[in-house]
Amino acid sequence: MKFTCERSFLLKEIAIAQEIISSKNVISIYSNVYLEAKDDTLLIKATDTKVNFETKVPVIVEEAGSITVFGEKFLGILNSSPDGELIFEQKDSKIFIKSTVKRANWQLKSIASEKFPEFAVSTAEFFDLPIRDFKDMVDQTIFAVSDDETRYFMNGVFFEKAEDKIIMVATDGRRLAYISKPASPSVKDFSGIIIPPKILNILTKRAGEEGSVSISVTDKTIFIRFGSYDLSSVLLEGQFPNYRRVIPENLENSFSVNRQETLDALRRVSLLVEQKSRRVYMGLTPGSMAVYSEDSELGTAREEISCKYDGPELAIALNYHYIEEPFKAMGEEEISIKFGDPTKAITVQPVPERDLFHIIMPMQLD
C-alpha cells in the first residue's frame, strides 16, 4: 500500500477515530485504526466493540492495500507533522510516513488488517431527519444523562417515535430534559431505544447545520449516517423510566428572565457555591430576582436582576449545574420557569414555548 494525502484532511478524521477507541493496549487490534487505500480514496475505521466509526477521505493511491496502525501514536505523528502532503507506504508489518515539505519521517509497526473486526450492517430501512433538528434534540438532552452505572438504563438518551412526533428524553433522577419534533412521513415506526452518549457526542461535534442525518434502528443497534460518516452503536438495555408520569401539571406560578443575564449572574454567584451541594438560591419579589449563594467557610455572593414576576415573596434552591445547563442549551432570549409548591419540581421552558422543557427538583432551602 502506498498513498499521498494532505495532512489536514487526515488529521481531522483520525482525531475522531481516536475518540472512538477505548483500548490503550498497544498490542490490541481495538487500539488500532484501519486504513484501506484504493480508487484514490482512503477508508478509515475505528471501534471500541460497541461504537463503530467509518469515513472516507480523498488521497492519491499509487498502490492499493490495507493495514491497521496504533491510533494514539498515529494521531501524535499527524499532530506534530508540518502542514502539507504526507506520503504513506506499507512495507511488511510497518508503515512509513514521510513529509514532503520537511525532512521528517516516521515508521510505525502495524497489525494485519485481516484481524480487524467486521462491522455490522443494518437490516432495517433508514429514515432521514434534518440534521439541525436532530442536533438540537441531542443538545437539549444529553447533559441530563445519569452517570450512575448502577442505573444503567438511565446512562443514555431515550429516543422514540410517538404518533406524529419523534421524542428525546434524558434523566438522572433529579432532573429531566424533554424535546420533540414533528415526524415526517419518511420516519419509520420503531420502539423506544436508549442511545449511549458517545455516538451522539461525535455527531454534535462533527455534523454541520445543513442537510440531513439518516438513521436506522434494529433491536440492538442504531446506525447513523451524515456527510461522509457512518456510525453505529450498540443500544443500552433495560426499561427507561416512564417520563410522562413525572411531568408536572397545573403549575399556577411562573416568572421569566433574560437568559444571558441570568447565566451571567449564575456564573458570578457560583464563585462562592459550596462544592458539595452546589446550591444556589433564587429569591423572588415582584419585578426582581436575587441570585445568591453561600459558602459557610468562605463567604457569600448575591446579584439582583430584573424578572417578570407578580407574586408573593419566596425563594427556590437549585443545584447550580441543573439550572445552568438548560439555560446554556436553549438559544431563546427569554426563559420561563413555572412552579407550584417551591419545594416540588419546577419546569423550565423557552419563551415563546415550544416542544421543549426541563424539569428540575429543587433542593432544601437550608
Image (cartoon, helix red, strand yellow):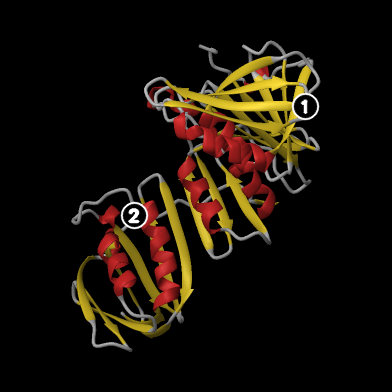
Q: Going by the image, does 8 lie left or right of 103? A: right
Dot 1 or dot 2: first in sequence order is 2
Image location (x, y in percent) of residue 225: 57, 56
Q: Secondary structure at mark 1?
A: loop
Out of 50 and 179, give the one closest to the viewer: 179
Quadrant including the N terminus: bottom left
- At a point 24% along the width and 88% down the height, the residue shown is 103
Residue 117: assigned label: 2
Q: Which residue is mark 1?
A: 287
What residue type is disc 1 on?
Answer: Gly
Residue 187: assigned label: none
Image location (x, y in percent) of residue 268: 53, 38
Q: Can you say whether 168 is above or below 241 in the image?
A: below
Separation of residues labelled 1 and 2 (CA atoms)? 62 Å
Q: Is residue 196 visible?
A: yes
Q: Going by the image, does 252 lie left or right of 209? A: right
